Image: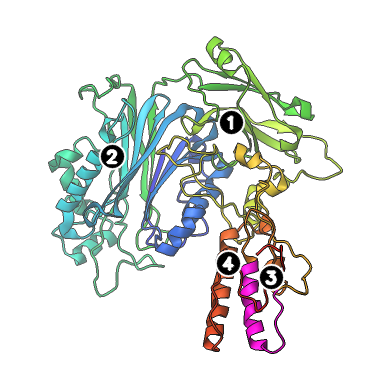
Amino acid sequence: ITVVTWNVGTAMPPNDVTSLLHLNTGETNDVDMIAIGLQEVNSKINKRLKDALFTDQWSELFMDALSPFHFVLVSTVRMQGVILLVFAKYYHLPFLQDIQTDCTRTGLGGYWGNKGGVSVRLSIFGHMVCFLNCHLPAHLEKAEQRKEDFATILHMQQFEGHVASGILDHDLVFWFGDLNFRIESLDIRFVKYAIDSNILSQLWEKDQLNIAKSTWSVLSGFQEGPLNFPPTFKFDVGTNKYDSSAKKRKPAWTDRILWKIKSPSVGLGAGGHQPSRGVLSVSQLCYCSHMEYTVSDHKPVAAIFAVQFASKADKPPVEIYVADEWSRPEQAVVRYKMAAGFHRSSWDWIGLYRVGFRHPKDYVSYVWARSDDGERCLEKQMCAQVMFSEDALPKRKGEYILGYYSNTSSSIAGVTEPFQISLPRSEEGSSPTDSSGSSSEEEDDSTLVLLAPKSRSPSPGKMKRHRSRSPSLAKFQDLILRPSSRDRGMSRSPSPQNRQGLPGDIPTIHLPQEEPGCCAAKGKDPGRATASQEGSSFYQTMWERGGPQCVSADNPLARADPRNLGLLPALRLEMIDQALGRRRESADQGYPCRRMSPTSPPGCSTSPKEGSSP
């Protein structure tokens, strides 16, 4: 397990994080999971609004860097500028269950999330593990406040279920982040001398966290490797030089990574859960900072752990069986078998992924896991079967993976080994719903999919809320609108609502021929006639479901088709605003005011024709 912490100081992401994640080295082949904790990610209001619709740039950076190495985003949680990302190799996903997230604010007495902690907890092969990313109060004299905030985070964060409801109830806890502990007593000149002379051990005994580990009961059992790297704070941005500003802050090891193994002597938890003696052990293989990153006044810190335990889960919750190659559409048959006790849902689905997919929603296509005999197959431990339609299959040859997504646990419960898809190319070209003609990154650059921040589940309607939120879709460099999936007839989103036809009651703007007598003005009052025509034009733009209404051909919005725009409220507001502007102009010119209401005629100088609609 690799753990990374970095206070990014509201900076933009660097171009490359390969060395930070220890990629392209022999260590990467052995790493199974990666947890990344960030602090002070830009969380200004305009940036947060953008991140609410799209994945933030830092998460995109790490997903892009890790997906070629077969890492998939398992879970993520954000509290303002504090972000936690947990990745795992795709073939471990079925054995990562009971995934939950939580966050605790401690800034401004608990009302502000600039300080606090976010966590992801999960069961790894049957062992409960919690990752806790914290940003604690700054400054040398705030040590007691840091202690109180950490105790508050441990007390406030509670998880659902009987097993490991609190953070310290887990078999293994990784605690990391910008913990903001400083070096006491020593003068800044001596601290810099010790750093330059590489005699860091003389600073260890004055480190506040080292002192606290032996005196604070709340830190009992937490372990940390030796600090054999220079203090990671505070640097001049863009350099490797310590603070040269007027404040001249003393260097300190603010960014730390600790771990704690649940002691076998601790009494039984709420659910009677207790690890067996000697079943889990942790050894730290690496603990270092990365001086090559200069975008922030902090240096990132990484640690690699070897975690050994006896597996409590030999088989995944869902086993998927598929042919070694799909060369014809009729071969796209998927058979799956659910383990006894698996909680299936009618909203479960099987996704088809390219090798190197980034997160569980990064599928090429999907099929609902709704076989008619699903319950009987689960009860009698038989294989159920579904089939991908020809339109849903990718047109490009390559290696793909099937994954069973459980809506109940919001995680992938079963995956296959990579297999080949090599379907014959159709002369008619790709299906409009097929996205395999371009890479996922290319698709993301040319597509805008607006997602509500709390409606990221693939199932529609009012579903059970999960505390663990899956990420939104990938990055969007340009804002390009495309017709909605309902207009195209097919959808890549696993929501049955998107497969329905276009509702027939959406109002359409019609442009009938002008009637020469309608709202005609008398020749003796041209000013009154002009104002009357403008008022009538506004009135005619208002439509009702009862039937088509007249629209002035002079209005440029009359030529817009709301079926394509999909922005009826915005159109209506704009027309009201334009009309009110005309009304004010009429009043300024001395014309009598008219009551402009959809329920009253528009005050023409002549009466409407008998029998005509108002």
Q: Are marks 3 and 4 in contact (CB under 8 Å)?
A: no
The label shown at residue 425 is none
The label shown at residue 349 is 1
Residue tagged 4:
600
Q: Residues within 10 Å of mark 1 (few under 14, many from 20)?
A: many
Residue 329 among magenta residues: no
Q: Nearer the viewer, residue 257 or 122?
A: 122
Q: Of tags 3 and 4, which is closer to the observer? A: 3
Q: Specify whether 578 is left or right of 504.
A: left
Residue tagged 2:
157
Q: Position of residue 327 (x, y in %)?
A: 78, 30
First in sequence: mark 4 vs mark 1:
1
Q: Nearer the viewer, residue 157 or 248?
A: 157
Residue 172, placed above or below residue 22: above
Q: Position of residue 269 (x, y in %)?
A: 25, 24
Q: What segment is highlighted magenta in the picture?
A: 519-540
Judging from the image, what secondary structure is the residue with disc 1 in?
strand
Q: CA distance from mark 1 to mark 3?
A: 59 Å
Query: Which three-letter amino acid code belongs to the residue tagged 1?
Result: Trp
> Splitting the image into 4 quarters, where does residue 392 fall?
top right
Q: Quadrant of the C terminus?
A: bottom right
Residue tagged 3:
608
Query: Which three-letter amino acid code belongs to the residue tagged 3?
Result: Pro
